């Protein structure tokens, strides 16, 4: 599907030279884009490509938001909030205030929650996780070994050291996602014990993790994982509050992120963006997390929902060094520490972490302008969600961008994010 006319459409769009508006018809939006150092006509190329994506049925709808130098240069809602409802005759256009399931874009929230407690003096990054959950004190590690015939066997050995809060933040704990890990012994153990982030209470989640081995010695390998969900449990233990209540009090409330939560209330359900009914590649029904009913736990790795505008306030706070509109959430030093690379020579075990990137405390962190096959600056940090959401922050360019849609994981989603990134950077004119 990726070799279709999409790439050709992008190239054609980038070839457009005529401005969207006559030179004399300067609008507030045009002035804002110019203040931000972004070309309004070049940003229009981006909108044109994603509008074609909707017309061709690749995505149901999307909200795009780009800001630079403290100015919102682009904020567009394209397509349908609910394509099935629209096909049935309902009025369901995409709206700027549409609410999206964030999945892993929840992880930066949980990471900030942990760092707020570090600033409060209620935990340290060197704390062993077993300080809060003694059940996790004596975990073993499943070490793979190949015999002469190429068959992999596993030996259980004691962990060299306890996993720490820092390990949870940077995904070096040895905990994994069962659907991604190459460690078959751990995968089987997770499935047997029911280790997951869904349909388990906080106590059940920790108890089940205490019965399975780690995939790696703590601090030695990066593997994307349930670590942030466990981090959420640590936040709850250290604060005495549920993760959603803590975030509401310390992050969402102060930043006026009024539509961000782990539960979409009945009054807002009509604003929830929906995917296509079925996956066009597989023909299977698309089922996303039901954020309209209470979950058994506040999943710090995947459980929240938000609007693009709310997430933009969160990112602007980070770009500002921890404060927004006179409200300080984190210190400038804490934000700089979170968005620095914490891996150094630690290598990833799976390709979720892209070439040229390390990982900080909740974000992938770009180590240089080159290496990766997408444009960016050293020090840029980003992440995305499994249902089509994504963001990046570029401190060098004083820029951030948010893309919100509801799709299924796969190559097309990654291509959309890369496309969005290149189209934003080509609009920089100062």
Image: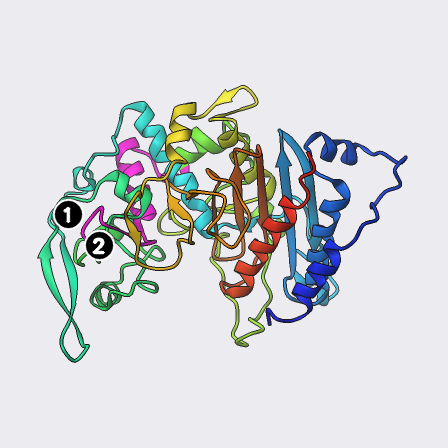
Expressed as whole percent of the image width and height from the top left, the position of residue 307 reads 58, 44
Q: Residue furthest front?
A: 370
Q: Position of residue 249 (x, y in %)?
A: 43, 30
Residue placed at 29% from the left, 44% from the top? 168
| Residue ID for mark 2 | 209
Q: Secondary structure at mark 2?
A: helix
The N terminus is located in which quarter? bottom right
The image quarter containing residue 208 is bottom left
Q: Measure how far apart labels 2 and 1 are at the Cα level.
A: 9 Å
Q: Which residues are magenta?
A: 216-244
In this rendering, is residue 295 above or below 69? below
Residue 262 lies, with reference to residue 112, above or below; the image says below
Q: Residue 66 falls in which quadrant of the image?
A: top right
Q: Quadrant of the C terminus?
A: top right
> Residue 385: x percent and y percent?
48, 53
- Which of disc 1 and disc 2 is earlier in sequence? 1
Res. 181 visible in picture = yes
When the figure is inspected, residue 423 is found, relative to residue 335, above or below; the finding is below
Determine if residue 201 is in view. Answer: no
Q: Residues within 10 Å of mark 2 (few under 14, many from 20)?
A: many
């Amino acid at each position: 599907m990726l070799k279709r006319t999409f790439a050709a459409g992008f190239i054609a769009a980038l070839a457009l030279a005529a401005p969207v508006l006559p030179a004399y018809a300067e609008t507030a939006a045009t002035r804002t884009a110019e203040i931000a150092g972004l070309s309004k006509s070049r940003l229009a190329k981006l909108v044109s490509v994603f509008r074609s994506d909707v017309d061709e049925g690749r995505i149901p709808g999307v909200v795009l938001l780009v800001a630079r130098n403290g100015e919102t240069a682009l904020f567009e809602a394209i397509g349908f909030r609910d394509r099935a409802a629209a096909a049935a005759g309902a009025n369901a256009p995409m709206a700027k205030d549409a609410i999206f399931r964030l999945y892993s874009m929840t992880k930066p929230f949980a990471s900030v929650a942990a760092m707020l407690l570090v600033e409060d003096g209620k935990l340290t990054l060197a704390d062993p996780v077993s300080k809060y959950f003694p059940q996790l004190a004596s975990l073993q590690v499943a070490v793979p070994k190949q015999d002469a015939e190429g068959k992999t066997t596993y030996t259980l050995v004691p962990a060299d050291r306890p996993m720490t809060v820092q390990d949870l933040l940077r995904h070096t704990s040895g905990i994994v996602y069962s659907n991604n890990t190459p460690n078959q012994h751990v995968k089987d153990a997770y499935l047997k014990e029911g280790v997951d982030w869904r349909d388990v209470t906080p106590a059940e989640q920790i108890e089940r993790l205490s019965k399975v081995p780690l995939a790696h010695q703590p601090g030695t390998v990066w593997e994307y994982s349930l670590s942030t969900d466990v981090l959420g449990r640590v936040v709850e233990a250290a604060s005495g509050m549920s993760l959603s209540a803590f975030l509401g009090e310390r992050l969402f409330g102060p930043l006026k992120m009024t539509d961000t939560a782990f539960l979409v209330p009945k009054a807002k359900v009509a604003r929830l963006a929906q995917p296509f009914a079925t996956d066009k590649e597989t023909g299977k029904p698309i089922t996303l997390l039901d954020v309209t009913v209470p979950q058994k736990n506040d999943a710090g790795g995947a459980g929240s929902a938000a609007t693009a505008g709310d997430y933009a306030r969160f990112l602007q706070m980070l770009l500002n060094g921890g404060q927004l509109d006179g409200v300080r959430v984190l210190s400038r030093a804490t934000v700089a520490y979170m968005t620095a690379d914490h891996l150094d020579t630690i290598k990833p075990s799976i390709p979720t972490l892209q070439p040229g990137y390390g990982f900080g405390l909740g974000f992938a962190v770009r180590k240089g302008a080159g290496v990766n096959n997408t444009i960016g600056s050293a020090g840029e940090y980003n992440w995305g969600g499994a249902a089509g959401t994504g963001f990046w922050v570029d401190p060098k360019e004083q820029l951030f961008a948010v893309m919100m849609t509801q799709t299924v994981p796969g190559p097309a989603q990654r291509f959309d994010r890369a496309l969005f990134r290149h189209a934003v950077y080509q609009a920089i004119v100062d």
